[in-house]
Image (spheres, rainbow, N blue to C red):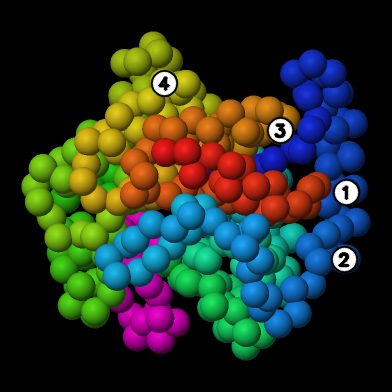
Amino acid sequence: MSGRDCHIGDVELSEHRVPRRTFLKQMVAGGLALSGSSILRSAGDAARVPAEKALPVVKLGDKKVTRLIAGYNPIGGYSHSTKKLAEHMLHYFTVERTTEFLLHCEEEGITTWQADHTPKVRDALRAAWERGSKIQWLCLTSDAVPKELLSLKPIAIVHHGGVTDSMFQTGKQERIHDFVKKVHDAGVLAGVSTHNPNFLAKVEDAGWENDFYMTCFYNISRTSEEIQRMVGDLVLGELFLESDPRNMTKRVRQVKKPCLGFKILGAGRLCWNKRSIERAFAFAYANIKPTDAAIVGMYPVFSDEVREDADFARKYSKRT
């Protein structure tokens, strides 16, 4: 899952107080105008990555991935904010634009894409590979391991974080363990995703055979009862707490296996300007292990977020 689900470039909404109607009109107009011609430059055949674009890598089992991995949420329409934004994301990310997105990620040194198993993902991967791409696919799912999924040769299959948390909350966590075993039986690396640092600790303490984790910086899977006990009321939508990233990264540093941190930008909530985005990247890489990586969703409608995020990753992922 991604960290940057909606990035609004340099617009400082908190300072300029752009009227809601004006902002939405500008946003939709800009997005629809770009839907006819992508701001991503066509990559043509997959380009060789110049030395200055190279990103540090870490190992997942016998595979190498860059410390910045492209996320899926904007492509799948998971905005973690509003239905209209989700629809805008789905409208923008056609198969063709998703293919161009993957090629552009490679131009910026990103070697791996985390995504669900959907027809759009399948078609975009195949189209990118036909154009010479070497992009690696890291699959997130909670289903069985169908042959069609395996035919796309994922480097790893990860148990979906929301389902992981629900299973722990209902005492069904052994189903996750069974999933890990089935993935290994298929000859693929297995991961477990979670939004809850306590569930991460439980899996690690139990000594499961998973090869790595996906760890959300924000615990958005709290139950309604938990939230009501914490704040004395129910919230509209998901609860993002400022202390969550510190709590998760503390656990991440305690586990031995590699972790792929996601939602490092709070699903767009830390994207008011480039300074806040940069601070989030700096925090993420300073607080995860040197053997860990970050997954970030990118929505390149208003600016070249692929290049911007890769630049931040090149700057900060070498310092840990």
Q: Is residue 24 visible?
A: yes
Q: Earlier in the sequence, mark 2 or mark 4?
A: 2
Q: Confirm or deny contact between disc 1 and disc 2 (CB under 8 A).
A: no
Q: CA distance from mark 3 to mark 2?
A: 25 Å
* Residue 190 in picture, x, y percent from top left: 26, 65
* Residue 44 in picture, x, y percent from top left: 75, 79
Q: CA distance from mark 1 to mark 2?
A: 11 Å
Tell me which segment is drawn in magenta.
Answer: 140-163
Residue under label 3, please give it.
Answer: 274
Q: Give the residue displayed 86% in from the left and 23% down from the top.
A: 19
Residue type (three-letter) at the residue carrying disc 3: Lys
Residue type (three-letter) at the residue carrying disc 1: Gly
* Residue 205 in picture, x, y percent from top left: 11, 42
Residue under label 1, please give it.
Answer: 30
Viewer-closest of 32 and 301:
301
Specify whether 37 is left or right of 52: right
Q: CA distance from mark 3 to mark 1?
A: 19 Å
Q: Is residue 54 above or below residue 117?
A: above
Q: Earlier in the sequence, mark 3 or mark 2?
A: 2
The extreme top residue here reads 232
Front label number (3 vs 1):
3
Viewer-closest of 232 and 305:
305
Q: Give the residue displayed 28% in from the left and 55% down from the top.
A: 212
Q: Is residue 235 above or below residue 147?
A: above
Residue under label 2, please give it.
Answer: 37
Q: Earlier in the sequence, mark 3 or mark 1?
A: 1
